[in-house]
Image (cartoon, grey):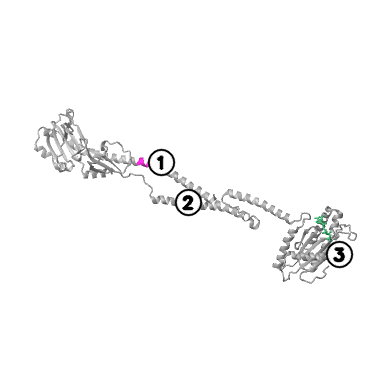
Amino acid sequence: MTLRSFSLALLSSLLLSLMLLLMLIYYIVYLPNIESEIIDQQQQEYQLLQSAFALSKQGVSSLSFDYAVWDEMVSYVQNPNNEFIHENMVSSSFEATNIHAVFIHNVDRQLVWKYQNEVLKGVKATIRQGDVDLAILPSQADIALQKVSERSGYIVVAGQLVFYSNHTIVPSSGVGEVAGSLTMVRLVTEKLVDELSRFSLVNFSLLPVDPNSMATFEEFFTAKPISVMAKSHTWVLVDPFDQQQLLLTIYHKKFAANQLPLTTVLLIFLFLGLIVALGMQVLSLLLTEPINQFNESIKSLPENNYINKVPSEYFIKELVSVSHSFNQLLNKFNAQQNYLETLTVQDALTGIANRRGLEAFGNKTISNWQDLAVGFSVIMIDVDHFKHFNDTQGHLAGDEALKTVAKNLQQTATEFQDDRVFVARYGGEEFCVIALFDDPLLVGKMAESLRAKVESNKIANTLPDKQWLTISAGGVIISAQTSDKAYRFNDFLKLADEQLYLAKKAGRNQVKLVEFNKKPTDMTP
Ligand SMILES: Nc1nc2c(ncn2[C@@H]2O[C@H](COP(=O)(O)OP(=O)(O)OP(=O)(O)O)[C@@H](O)[C@H]2O)c(=O)[nH]1
């Protein structure tokens, strides 16, 4: 798994967890609370409507009381006469106060007088079903009390909801012999429904019960509190025989918790997607890219054999620390590398460059000659009669002698423009000198100095005619101006070797030089 896909998975699962948490909070904490609040509100609407009904009947009750508790009403019931009716029971005043029916009964429940508005034609104040007296008129017990008493309530009569108020007719003092009873009825008209709705701010309807419907409802005035959130709640209103007559439905203002619309949900998802994308960019900038840079630095090794240092300025502290440690490791590694490289180009015995070093320097010299027209010369050197030296004085002494010769050559080279003369051990008792100049006189002078320096050591040899250890040298001078440059270093080594052979042949302890592409002349200084 790549760091990038890991970060993506991590970031996405974090956001998903967050969403899950929000959903849990929404469904477990927020929604149930909202639901119970809504149920409370719906219950309040129900209670408000009940209060509105209760308030609306007060006017009827007090008017009924005023008429019933009145001496003249007592006299009228005992001696009914038209004069009283004309003077006091005026239909216009009942209409003005929304009284739709008035009944006066004597104590024997006989109707003495009645007023009925058009809308309530046919409604009786006594309602009987078989032998059961469901009258709203006072009972014997009410009459026996000998004081004012009231029976009131909402009932459905002939399919219409009415409020009735029945008072015993007693003298104005409120106590005394009961003469009869007075009933006032108010019909709950559409207009009243409208007024109640406006007064209570509760939207409701009153409709007749569908006789085919099997649904059962609680009675409106005695119902239990609302327990379930719904768009509307319906109760029933019954007639005096407990028959369901009217359905009262409240249409609630609030009936559901606000749901998030689809577009909002989509926008939230889009927003979360953007957060993931942005988070990925930041992570990539802060984490993935620096690590990729590390990787690139390490991968660059095969190209230049040298690991580049990684940048150490990062936002993340741990990366700074890792990059520092990495660079420190790199320093050690590069030092080791340098050391190893010196080991491979250095001759173990003499400490000067070995054949590999010679080849590297020689190739570079050839390039400079070809590209930059730098002339040079190659001198091959061989210790004279070294086999004899070894055989007679031992190999260790031979080693020491080689070390001395190498030291002599190096010293002389240093005296002769250090940075332009390169000395190497070619192998065995053979050495090679490359001088980055092509002046035959100067090259000859240097070669002669090399030879003389070794002889001046006076390392004793045991040959009868050769008192000291000497060297022979053969060289080739390659001019900067040479037009034909299609040569390799080995070609010049060969030419130098030929000169060395001539020097040996001529008696050793001498120098033979030749200018490249020129007729050989004796250039012995
Ligand atoms: N002590 C020692 N001897 C070496 C080393 N390398 C080569 N030799 C010896 O150098 C000698 C070279 O001898 P030859 O090639 O016969 O040549 P020479 O005796 O020098 O005679 P000429 O070159 O003709 O003057 C051999 O005896 C090798 O063993 C070395 O590292 N140490």
Secondary element at tag 3 = loop
Where is residue 214 drawn, in percent x and y?
25, 39
- 340 vs 197: above or below: below
Q: Is residue 525 visible?
A: no
Which residue corresponds to the image point at 59% horizontal and 54% vertical from the top-left?
A: 293
Type of amino acid at the residue the image marks with label 2: Ile
Q: Is residue 458 left or right of residue 284?
A: right
Mark 3, residue position: 507
Which residue corresponds to the image point at 59% horizontal and 50% vertical from the top-left?
A: 320
Q: Residue furthest right?
A: 464
Q: Please tell me in which quadrant of the rendered image residue 153 appears.
A: top left
Which residue corresponds to the image point at 50% horizontal and 51% vertical from the top-left?
A: 279
Stretch in magenta: 30-37
Secondary element at tag 2 = helix
Front residue (pair 150, 1): 1
Q: Any magenta on residue 439?
A: no
Mark 2, residue position: 275
Type of amino acid at the residue the image marks with label 3: Gly
Compute the Cα span from label 3 to label 2: 91 Å
